Image: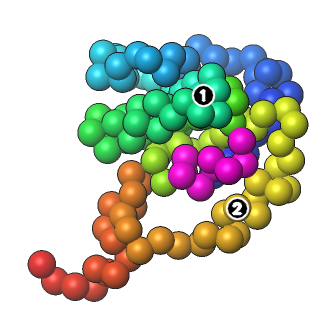
Amino acid sequence: MKLITAHAHAAESDRSQVIALANDADPRALQLEGVERIDLSFPKFTDGRAFSQAFLLRRRLGFKGEIRAVGDVLIDQLVQMQRSGFDSAVLRADQNPDFAQRQFDRYPAFYQGDAVHTQPQFSAGIAP
């Protein structure tokens, strides 16, 4: 997962093929053709509706572009964001990217499938 500082995200200028989706919007209503990135909002740490939106975009709607988490994004959420289908996250200004990377180092693999890797790890090599 690509980690982006709040300052770097604010400095981006080209947002022509980016959709910013409110966390109460239905992703199924989007026209995804030509969209390169969708920014999903976390208005509060405790509001996880964007997790469901990311999973829906990635698994059910087959969106192949970048899904980016923006808003109140804390280090604690990053591993689950990645498993839900997010490609990048804009960390809240008080979050340290070096500490964030440690979360991924702690959990390098999972037995269960997720939004991106649907096959469970234990089923690799097992014929159906």
Residue drawn at point x = 63 percent, y = 22 percent = 43
Is residue 52 found inside the magenta-colored segment of the image?
Answer: no
Residue 62 to residue 80: above or below? above
Residue 123 to residue 62: above or below? below
Judged left or right of residue 77, residue 101 is: right
Circle 2 residues within 10 Å: few <14, some 14–19, many ≥20? some
Judged left or right of residue 99, residue 118 is: left
Residue 84 in percent (x, y) is at 46, 47
- Please state the extent of the stretch shown in magenta in the rendering: 74-82
Q: Quarter-wise, where is residue 20 in the image? A: top right
Coloration of the structure image: rainbow
Residue drawn at point x = 75 percent, y = 59 percent = 101
Q: Which residue is mark 2?
A: 103
User: What quarter of the picture does the C terminus occupy?
Assistant: bottom left
Q: Which residue is mark 1?
A: 42
Distance (Cα) linking label 1 and label 2: 19 Å
Residue 48 to residue 11: above or below? below
Please report whichever mark, 1 or 2, sits nearer to the chain's N-terminal start: 1
Q: Residue type at mark 1?
A: Phe
Residue drawn at point x = 69 percent, y = 30 percent = 72
Return the residue nearer the eye: 100 or 20: 100
Is residue 81 found inside the magenta-colored segment of the image?
Answer: yes
The dominant secondary structure in magenta is helix
> How many numbered marks have been drawn onto this rendered protein structure?
2
Secondary structure beneath dot 1 equals strand
Q: Residue type at mark 2?
A: Gln
Secondary structure beneath dot 2 equals helix
Residue 78 in percent (x, y) is at 63, 49
Residue 65 appearing in the image = no
Residue 78 appearing in the image = yes
